[in-house]
Image (cartoon, rainbow, N blue to C red):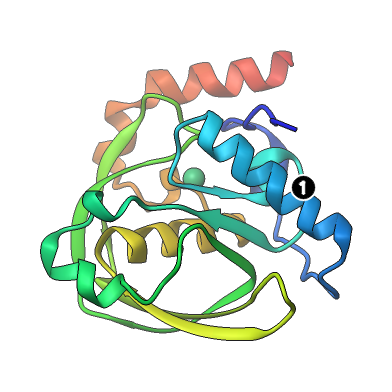
Amino acid sequence: MIYQVVTFGHEILRQKAVPVAKVTEAVRQLVRDMLESMYAAKGVGLAAEQVGHTESICVIDVPRDAEKEACREENAAVTMPLVLINPEILATEGKQRNEEGCLSFPEIGAPITRADKVTVTYTDLDGARVTVSARGLLSRAIQHEVDHLNGILLVDRMSAMQKMSVSGQLRRLQKNAQEE
Ligand code: NI
């Protein structure tokens, strides 16, 4: 099933995700639906809140060729799509600054500073605890989606100046959310 992605202004995006106690068939179905919804929306990542759920789950699929050459080898060990259940960032290293967007903020993007490298531990679909490291775009996607699970949004990572430059679009999204 394809969910319509929840946009900025909806209260659920501000909720902190609830840890998944057990990877049940319902959890696996939600993951399938999240992947389907992410691909339909042409996104590279999606968190449960964005489809109206509060489970601590996010999905990511960063195309290899979207990644800078230098990062490809390092990220090669991570199989796509990446399904993170109860993710927890263990360590970060370095800095990167690149354009970032979000399906909950259609047509809004801004250069955002993130850690270059991230190490994240999570539960996989078999219920096993796994730890991976990533750099570049994949690292950015992981940090962005884990933010979602903590109720932190793209707008919170923008500078005052960046927010000002998209204030009209933000207001419109909020107004639309109130009217829904
Ligand atoms: Ni997002």
Towards the viewer: 20 or 165: 20
Q: Is mark 1 within 8 Å of ligand 1?
A: no
Residue at 77%, 71% in the rendered image: 19
Q: Residue furthest left?
A: 70
Residue at 55%, 39% in the rendered image: 38
Residue that badge 1 annotates? 53
Q: Quadrant of the C terminus?
A: top right
Residue at 37%, 53% in the rendered image: 62
**Is residue 29 placed above or below 131 in the rendered structure?**
above
How dense is the environment of label 1, judged by Cα within 10 Å: few (below 14), some, or many (20 and up)? Answer: some
Towards the viewer: 62 or 165: 62
Residue 116, given in percent of the width and then of the height, sits at 24, 71
Asked which quadrant contains residue 40, the reply is: top right
**Is residue 91 placed above or below 99 in the rendered structure?**
below
Q: Quadrant of the N terminus?
A: top right
Residue 96, given in percent of the width and then of the height, sits at 19, 64
Residue 174, given in percent of the width and then of the height, sits at 58, 24
Q: Is residue 74 left or right of residue 29?
A: left
Towards the viewer: 81 or 180: 81
Q: Is residue 80 left or right of residue 20?
A: left
Residue at 69%, 30% in the rendered image: 2
**Is residue 54 placed above or below 13 in the rendered structure?**
below
